[in-house]
Image: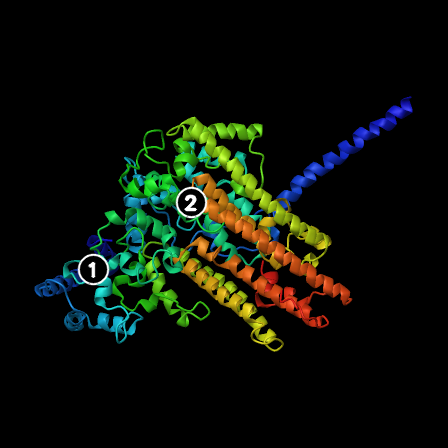
Amino acid sequence: MNHAANHQVIRLTRGLPATLLLCGISLFGMMAVSAAEPPDGALSEEACRTCHAGRDEALVDAWRESAHGGTPAVAGCSACHGSDHAHVGVRARQDDACIDCHGGPKAPVVHSYATSKHGLILRLEQSEWDWRRPLRDAAYRSPGCAYCHLHDSEHDVGRSVRSDPMGPDRGGTVADHLRGVCQECHAPRYVTRLFDNGEKMLETGRMKVREARRLLEEAAHRYDASTLAEGRALLATMQRHLRNVRLGVGHQSPDYQWWHGQPALDGDLLRLKGMLGALERERRLPRTPTAERR
Amino acid sequence: MGATAVKRARYIWIPLLALLIAIPAGFYYVHWSQQGEGAGFYSRLWSPEAIFAYWAPDDFYDSVQSVEGRFEGPACVSCHSAITPGIVNDWRASRHARAETPVYCSDCHGDDHRRLHMPTPRVCGECHATQHGQFLDERRFGFPSHALALERALDANHFVDKPKAEVTACLQCHSVAAKCDSCHTRHRFAAAEARRPEACITCHSGPPHPDVESYFASAHGQIYLAEGAEWDWSKPLREGNYRAPTCAYCHMHQGQHQVADKPIWKFGIKQVNPLTSANRVRRKRWLEVCDDCHDEALARDALVGLDRERKRAWEKLYAAEAELRSLREENLFHPAAGSRPPYPNDWLDRLWPRARIGFFEGQASAFYNVSPIERDYFEMWYFDNLSAYKGAAHGDAERVQAAHARLDADLKAIRARADRLREQARREQAAGIVAPDPSSLWLNGEYTEFNREHN
């Protein structure tokens, strides 16, 4: 959304005197910022950090603490922003800045988004959008990667990502952070219900994985590791299916929630049970040299 | 003579009386079965999740209660540009906003904030009567179709059985029967958007229906990918307007909203005779579509090629089904049909447990609560077979070849598994073991138990 609509929010919520004060501060700030000349030509990582550490300290710190940061940096400023200062924002706001490092177009994390309604609207319309606008206030008709995961210049991408589908949502902080993002376009109650349902859907997937894990743990008392190798491989596949459910929920992709997710989990769970059932039956048989595993 | 006539009359009045009782009782039973907390024929057997309000609004939508009062359109816009600016931006760019008399929020959602409703197709149909009429008319062509997608999903065995938060995944696509914005995304609702293949991708992709993958790999799709961005999508889907067809060009020819109106092979899910009189009519209608660009002979060959591909696929599928049926006769499924958690709606299954083999026995729900070899066949039928069909239908020869190679491999794997099952049974029999299944395995477990208790 644009500048004028931000004013609409301020006017509706703060009243006239406060609005004038806010505008004054805002204008002064804009003049001060534009007074510093952006550098010309290609930039080094060091140059970015030296200059921006003084200007956007919190932003640089957030990046340093994030999965992209670290020493040496996993993804430095230029990895997403490029090195041409005139186009740093426009470049980093678009999905192309993320896709190559995140496995390319066929990787589940990219494909689950690309086939969602958000991804498809973006694919059709992105060439007409003004990518100079900041990533907030529904400035884009549909969110790209950065709109949700680096919303309003939030450089700690981990705030909007749940990397472990088996684990809890760090006290609900990821959901709380994203709720505000989704509500810029969607009704608050819709977002709440969607999140609650997504959590429950993910939990049914987790139950399947836990059921499988439990069966394998019990079987480990009766069979040696090599006998259960196929079962462990099935469990590993189930963990990938569960990750698909998480991606499907997060990116709103029905296919990842379902065909790459839940029924895929069902299939490998029953194959594991089939395998263990056959082993159990085999155990009850008198010993023969050609024992079948399945 | 007279006495015989009276006796004979019995053959008329007894059935007549039975019918007089049975017909209203049947109607009443159907009505009664739909009065439960859920929806559809098995509504008494399940309860909805809160999110269902948005996927099946006719059954479950409840208005928000947090804001009170009646609002005119401009008041909605003013408040919501601060609360949900994205919605308002979209609406402003739509034809609804730019019309001489704008179509405001309240025209579709109502003006009483505590009695808002979701604009279902019926609401859209108040203005877009032609499209809505066509959309409803699609029902007469049967399922699979958009118009019947929701009710058939709600009545599916696995939908009734599984935890509702899990099967919400189904509703996101099957709600197409209740939401025009499945294709014309809100709140812009552009016809131009729905004409492009991207409008269909979210639902028509993935293992059982790789429509979009096969289309993009075809010559038609390749032309679209190369040039589509420059075409004028405001033009209707008619002869001469587009250099290559999109999903909608063929399946919604000339913009008509009966999408599945000429389904010869029924999605590839069951074998059909492609040359029945009804299918001959459909073939003729397909030729009329292809005729916009192609010579009739070429189009005819494409249809015949598809007939042949289907015949080949069904030979392989029936070979696998025969193997499964034979295992069923020999009682060699582990778990046996009676040792699996039954569907809550299926009393017949409890009286007469029987594994479901093939489309007509309810194969579509047989992807869990079954033995591994049945699941293998489910994947052969639903993933590899349908991939072959979509490849053949959309002109993606490479996909057809790859999918048929997989069908061959599937059949081989099913036969090998069947041999192992027989071999183990033979040795069990020799050892005098009568009931070989470790029963707790299939009826217990965290998800298995949760699933049984949460419909």
Foreground residue, B20 or B298? B298
Real-space Cα separation, disc 2 to disc 1, in angstroms: 36 Å
Quarter location, residue A230: bottom right
Quarter location, residue B212: top left
Residue A102 seen anywhere in this rendered image of the structure: yes
Q: Badge 1: how crowded within 10 Å, few (<14), some, or many (20+)?
A: some
Kind of residue sitting beneath label 2: Ser
Residue B175 higher or lower than B302, as above or below: below
Quarter location, residue B256: top left
Q: Residue at x 77, y 33 (%)?
A: B15
Image quadrant containing the C terminus of chain A = bottom right
Q: Badge 2: how crowded within 10 Å, few (<14), some, or many (20+)?
A: many
Asked if marks 2 and 1 fall on the same chain, the answer is no
Q: Residue at x 33, y 68 (%)?
A: A159
**Residue B103 at what x, y percent from top left?**
33, 39
**Residue B22 at what x, y percent from top left?**
72, 38
Kind of residue sitting beneath label 1: Gly
Residue furthest front in the image: A289
The reply, left or right, for residue B69 in relation to residue B305 is left
**Residue A89 at what x, y percent from top left?**
20, 59
Q: Residue at x 87, y 28 (%)?
A: B7
Tag 1, which secondary structure? helix
Q: Which residue is mark 2?
A: B214
The reply, left or right, for residue A275 in relation to residue B284 is right
Q: Which residue is mark 1?
A: A89
Point out which mark residue B362 bears. none
